[in-house]
Image (tube, rainbow, N blue to C red):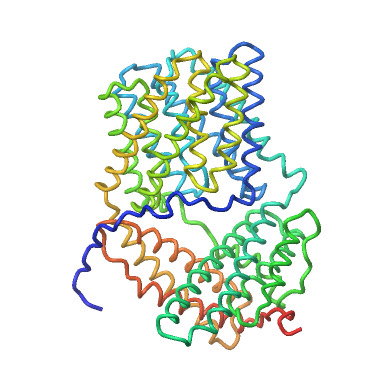
């Protein structure tokens, strides 16, 4: 290796094509959509009946927790939702106490920015998933600017706690009907991803010999499909690990995930149709498709894989996220202060806009900024059209908010800007729970804060560089190489210990998934060491070849349907 220091990666061209492209909806889009309507609707309608709709902001803090953890198995969901509710209550408590102690907008903006940075780091470190830190930032920032006395704080926190408990029950309720739904969906995704890779492998292998350019394109496409398949399989195992005891249903799902792994190792000998058929059967409520164990080692998969998948301590996971937390703190603070300087009455909207931008790298942050601005501007126009209806009375106001809650979750998985079209009028209507306001003033403030938050937030992302991205790639490469060498030694051993090869294979698969995620994040970052693309590709290809060899060494056989 050369001892010369690698040159920094120059600023890349920011993409515009495809940023607003509408994709397919999430396969469970209706679950968070219906959950949030029930979780928000019951408290709000209760307050409406009591004539205290002005307290709805505090119940919303707990109700919106129902948006989280819909992909998690119910045993893990119960824990995750409890932590989400506790985290929300902690953030609201800090915001309300701060608001009761000071009315200085400068201090309030600073606290809001620090809360947003902490929420960003914790959500990314725990990988809680969508909607991530945005809901936390929205609630805590709005709470900072709500008139408050110290004596009111306990009562308002009690409302948030009651709504949070209700949101927990709403999130757990589907488990009564379909207790294994999340892990079944994760297994189905793994089977479909493996089938897609097998199909692409066969299609591109036939054309790869035509020319060097065609071969390179085909190889790159296969690499992407294989990485997607490996990530889906890894996610399926993680879902199964979180289910607790190994029931017969879980054992059947494990055998299906093993089949997906075998397909990734031997795509040419795989029957994609069989994999897709099993995936379709998992979508309903019928029994899990029964398949024969792939080998006598199959019964050891769950225990050994779970042992190999231990999570790092939270402090270790927070370290690499420091640049993103600094970006969030700086961007949110500056956005709030610019909004104050412009005389906008609700600087927390600028804080939330900036907080919503920050993704894994600058390129993704830019894309999110474009989506946020477009969605908010269209959403303001939608608010102008709906405001006369919402102003017919408090009941109409509540029903409009519920409709926008549903619409936001129904659309946001297709593209963030579509969801923002509904989020924007919903946020504007929430401010009117304490009393109807002039639509023109609300719309102007929202537009100004959106533009300020997006511009200042992105500028902060450019200023705060993520120099650790290069270190993370080097660490991920080292981890893959160590895992590959360990697996190779066990493959060569005459009699590896019981479960040792399976545990090593699982560790290598996990390391490869982490390497791909790290490389993708670093590829969109600015002003850092050049990404070692060739080393990453080489490590991935040799790693996957070792995985395939391990599958054959374990005696795991391919699908008989291909030969039938």
Front one among 498 and 161: 161
Left of 235 or right of it: where is 518?
left
Residue shown at the point (59%, 50%) measured from the top left: 25
Furthest-left residue in this view: 4
User: Residue 99's image quarter?
Assistant: top left
**332 to 297, vertically: above or below:** above
Q: Residue 398: where, in percent of width, then height? A: 60, 22
Quarter of the image with the C terminus is bottom right
Q: Residue 200: where, in percent of width, then height? A: 56, 74
Front one among 352 and 489: 352
Left of 293 or right of it: where is 7?
left
Q: Residue 541: where, in percent of width, then height? A: 46, 77
Front one among 205 and 106: 205
Residue shown at the point (44%, 22%) measured from the top left: 96
Furthest-right residue in this view: 286
**455 to 161, vertically: above or below:** below
Q: Residue 491: where, in percent of width, then height? A: 55, 84
Number of marks present in the image shown: 0
**139 to 317, vertically: above or below:** above
Left of 402 or right of it: where is 321?
left
User: Residue 111's image quarter?
Assistant: top left
Residue shown at the point (74%, 49%) measured from the top left: 179
Quarter of the image with the N terminus is bottom left
Front one among 179 and 360: 360
């Amino acid at each position: 290796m050369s001892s010369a220091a690698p040159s920094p990666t120059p600023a890349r061209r920011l993409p515009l094509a495809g940023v607003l492209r509408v994709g397919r909806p999430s396969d469970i889009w209706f679950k968070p959509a219906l959950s949030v309507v029930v979780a928000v609707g019951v408290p709000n309608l209760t307050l409406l009946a009591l004539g205290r709709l002005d307290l709805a902001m505090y119940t919303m803090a707990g109700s919106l927790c129902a948006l989280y953890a819909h992909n998690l198995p119910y045993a893990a969901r119960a824990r995750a939702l409890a932590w989400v509710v506790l985290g929300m209550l902690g953030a609201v408590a800090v915001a309300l106490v701060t608001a009761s102690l000071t009315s200085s907008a400068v201090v309030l903006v600073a606290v809001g920015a620090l809360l947003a940075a902490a929420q960003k780091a914790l959500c990314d470190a725990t990988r809680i998933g969508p909607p991530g830190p945005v809901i936390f930032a929205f609630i805590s920032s709005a709470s900072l600017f709500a008139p408050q006395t110290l004596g009111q704080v306990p009562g308002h926190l009690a409302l948030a706690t009651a709504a949070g408990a209700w949101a927990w029950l709403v999130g757990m309720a589907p488990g009564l009907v379909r207790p294994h739904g999340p892990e079944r969906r994760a297994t189905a995704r793994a089977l479909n991803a493996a089938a897609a890779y097998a199909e692409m492998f066969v299609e591109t292998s036939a054309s790869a010999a035509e020319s060097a350019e065609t071969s390179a394109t085909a190889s790159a496409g296969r690499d992407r499909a294989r990485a997607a398949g490996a990530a889906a399989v890894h996610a399926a195992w993680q879902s199964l690990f979180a289910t607790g005891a190994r029931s017969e249903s879980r054992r059947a799902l494990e055998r299906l995930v093993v089949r997906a792994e075998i397909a990734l190792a031997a795509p040419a000998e795989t029957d994609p149709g069989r994999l897709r058929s099993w995936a379709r059967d998992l979508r309903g409520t019928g029994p899990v498709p029964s398949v024969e164990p792939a080998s006598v080692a199959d019964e050891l998969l769950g225990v050994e894989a779970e042992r190999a998948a231990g999570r790092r301590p939270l402090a270790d996971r927070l370290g690499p996220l420091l640049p993103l937390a600094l970006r969030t703190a700086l961007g949110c603070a500056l956005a709030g202060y610019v909004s104050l300087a412009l005389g906008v009455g609700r600087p927390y909207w600028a804080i939330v806009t900036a907080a919503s931008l920050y993704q894994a790298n600058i390129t993704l942050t830019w894309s999110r900024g474009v989506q946020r601005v477009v969605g908010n501007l269209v959403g303001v126009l939608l608010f102008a059209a709906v405001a006369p209806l919402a102003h017919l009375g408090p009941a109409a106001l509540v029903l409009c908010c519920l409709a926008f809650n549903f619409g936001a979750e129904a659309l946001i998985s297709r593209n963030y800007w579509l969801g923002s079209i509904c989020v924007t009028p919903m946020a504007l209507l929430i401010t009117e729970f304490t009393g109807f306001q002039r639509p023109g003033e609300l719309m102007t403030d929202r537009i100004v804060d959106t533009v300020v938050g997006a511009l200042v937030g992105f500028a902060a992302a450019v200023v705060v560089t993520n120099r650790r991205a290069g270190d993370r790639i080097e660490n991920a490469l080292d981890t893959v190489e160590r895992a590959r060498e360990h697996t190779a030694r066990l493959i060569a051993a005459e009699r590896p210990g019981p479960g040792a090869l399976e545990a090593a294979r699982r560790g290598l698969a996990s390391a490869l998934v982490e390497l791909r995620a790290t490389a993708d994040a670093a590829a969109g970052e600015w002003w850092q060491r050049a990404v070692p693309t060739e080393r990453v590709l080489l490590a991935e290809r040799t790693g996957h070849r070792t995985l395939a060899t391990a599958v054959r060494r374990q005696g795991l056989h391919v699908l008989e349907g291909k030969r039938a």
